Amino acid sequence: MSAISVHEFPDLQSVPQYRRLVKNPVVDKLRLAIPFDFIAISGLDVDDFRFGEKLFSDTTFPPAFIEAYIGEGLGKTDPFALAARQATQTVIEQEVYAREEPPQRLAYLARVSGIDNRTLFPIRRNDVTYGAITLARATPFEPGEIAF
């Protein structure tokens, strides 16, 4: 993950919606503490930006999944994403989907992409959520891992 340069992207419209996250020492250390298959680090810490207004993400999620998710607007109907936008605490996909099933298209894309058990940790300052870290893996995260 690299810092976004003000000179590289002079306005929010020019920031790419997602960037492929490749070899990163912070992510590698996190993976040693909590094994995961995929990670997405999203949001921007700038004035007047709120998490969920626009997707900016550095991610290891499969590109085909991300492109379909963004291109088809699946975040607008994904119960997990909708819960995440309102979150002040950890959001666990299994708990959200127990209350409301995901759209069939999203369930199919997640299944063929090997994406299971998404768990989102909001990044907040004061009362403002400006980003999140989402982890996913084949098995659910244990309570101790979530607390970490």
Image (cartoon, rainbow, N blue to C red):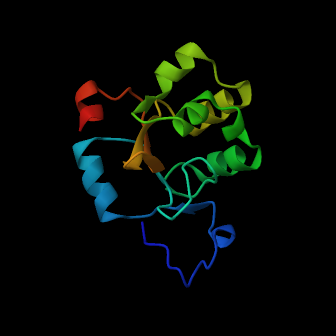
Which quarter of the picture shows residue 106? top right
Residue located at (29% from left, 64% from top): 25
> How far across and down, in percent of the image, does residue 102 sit?
65, 24
| Residue at 57%, 58% in the rendered image | 56
- Farthest residue to the bottom: give it: 7
Is residue 114 in view from this perspective? no
Would you identify the image quadrant in which residue 17 lies?
A: bottom right
Q: Is residue 17 visible?
A: yes
x then y, percent, for residue 51: 54, 49
Quadrant showing the N terminus: bottom left
- In terms of depth relative to the viewer, which is nearer, 115 or 19? 19
Give the vertical position of 86 relative to 45 (above or below): above
Numbered disc total? 0
Q: Position of residue 60 (x, y in %)?
A: 49, 53
Q: Residue furthest right?
A: 72
- Nearest the eye: 53 or 144: 53
Q: Residue at image x 69%, y 68%?
A: 13
Q: Position of residue 123 (x, y in %)?
A: 40, 48
Eyeballing the image, is 35 above or below 16? Answer: above
Farthest residue toward the top? 98
Pick whichever, 123 or 36, lies toward us: 123
Q: Going by the image, does 101 lie left or right of 116?
A: right
| The C terminus lies in quadrant | top left
Residue occupying image coordinates x 30% and y 56%: 28
